[in-house]
Image: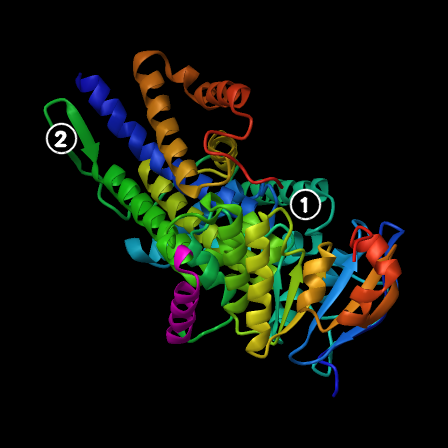
Amino acid sequence: MTLLLQQLLNGLIIGSTYAVVALGFSLVFTVARVINFAHPDIFMVGMFAGLLAGAHISQNFIVVLVAGALGAAAVGYGLERVVLRPLRSRDVLMTLMGTLGVAIMLQNGMAALMSPDPVAYPRVVPNVAFGTGDISISSLQVVNFGLSVVMLAAASFYVRRTRYGRATRAIAERPDVAAAFGVDVNRVSQITVVLASGMAGVAAVSVGLLYGSAWAFVGLLYGLKSFVCMLVAGNRYFDGVMLVALTLGVLEALVTGYFSSSLRDAVAFFVLIVVLYFRPDGLFGSYAV
Amino acid sequence: MTPLLTISDLHVSYKAVPAVAGVSLEICEGEVRVILGANGAGKTTIIKAILGLARPHRGAIRFAGQELLRLPSHRIHQLGISWVPEARQLWGSLTVLDNLRMGAFLENDRAKIAERVDHMFKRFPRLAERQTQVAGSLSGGEQQMLAIARALMSDPKLVLMDEPSLGLAPLVVRDVFRLAKEINGRGVAILMVEQNARQALKVADWAYLLSVGRVVESGRAADIAGKESVQEIFLGGRA
């Protein structure tokens, strides 16, 4: 029973980070109509931006967090201007190759700049363990989970309650009609990419703090898993993507706890195959793209 | 009277296949004009060209003195052109209320938006009842009302209506044309594309017959309705 509770807790915490990355990934996909392979590496850049700020500017938690968000958002902005916008409405393979190219550049660029191996993260948040009996949770986990929840709530509010958020959903469903009703699709697409990137940057800093290290190749697994979350949920409802990401975190933690941690990374793909076999549009449905 | 919208010598092709081949037409302020034609005659393409959603390779489209051809769609809408798309094309996953709000996307004054939403809900009580439902859950007739209400939310000078009667029950079709007349009565110009010639000619001031991408006939709606050739082609040969 304690193992179950502990693993559920661990799963929700890691799942909340998946949810932030997956939500950004799927927002960019539905609005800019591109599978942004660079999104997980924008996450990685955010992680290093926080690390550098912590090492050179200030050990203040907020400063590190803001640096992570800004670093990632800046790369997202550049990506939108240089790759996504010029390649929009071209063959989908071109944007795909474009973002993949940027992903590889970012990974290897960071590896060359910093180190190809994991780098120790500044300890800007004290690591304290809380717990009752056999269940324990660390202050770093609380920070990680708290930040994710705040960002998911903020993203949810943005998409549902604000004018530009509504436009985001309108573009996702019918870009032509949105444009004909006055929505500047390029502008909304840019805002979306920057917001999604900034969110990924914040999540990345909290993950760096949690594991105590940053790594130039950390993006790959987060990227694949968030892609899987979007496919499993379908891209119609952003809430669905969040739900699937949280569930994936929990499933992974249960598999790690009851079977073996070496099976952990296979869970996502097993779920993907099963779900797509029965529901090719994902659990909650997808827009035709 | 200077025309509100003037299209001259418009050519649009899809991958080298011409859809519109040299169409010229115009519409004045406060008028209803209708473009009649069979499927594939190029009617929707003309609408899309006006909206900047199809790119002509020749010709000119002027609206209120401004050339539209090089403008992006969102700037064209800003000039006062709105759209009731073919088959509605609502945002099915957005609520009725959000569809209406999106119709006034460029309006910065929240009070004005609320006032127009109120106005639409008074005119279409069914939409008010269903304001929190997603648009995809409405019946065909309700969806058409929402599509028309959405188009009016920006307080446009010209509304483009693309086959507003398509796929609707006969009673609803009558409502739609009556509504077009009502909107026009408030000074909004309407350029309509239709296959339902009989009904469309009743509300229109002027009609164009389109065939294979060209205007083959044009004139006052009453005159067009009386023409034998028109009756044969569009009105099933009955007077």
Q: CA distance from mark 2 to mark 1?
A: 48 Å
Subunit of label 1: A
Quarter holding residue B62: bottom right
- Tell me which residue sits at (65%, 50%) in the image: B166
Q: Please identify the dominant SS of the magenta region.
A: helix
Total label count? 2
Report the front residue among A73 and A151: A151
Q: Does residue A72 show up?
A: yes
Callout 1 crowding tier (Cα within 10 Å): few <14, some 14–19, many ≥20: many
Look at the image and say whether residue B115 sits in the magenta stretch: yes
Q: Position of residue B20 (x, y in %)?
A: 85, 59
Specify whether B32 is left or right of A26. Answer: right
Task: State the mark number for residue A95.
Answer: 1
Task: State the mark number for residue A131.
Answer: 2
Subunit of label 2: A
Secondary structure under tag 2 reads: strand
Q: Position of residue B87 (x, y in %)?
A: 62, 50
Report the front residue among A79 and A208: A79
Give the answer, above or below, for where B126 lies relative to B28: above
Task: State the mark number for residue A263.
Answer: none
Q: Does residue A70 show up?
A: no
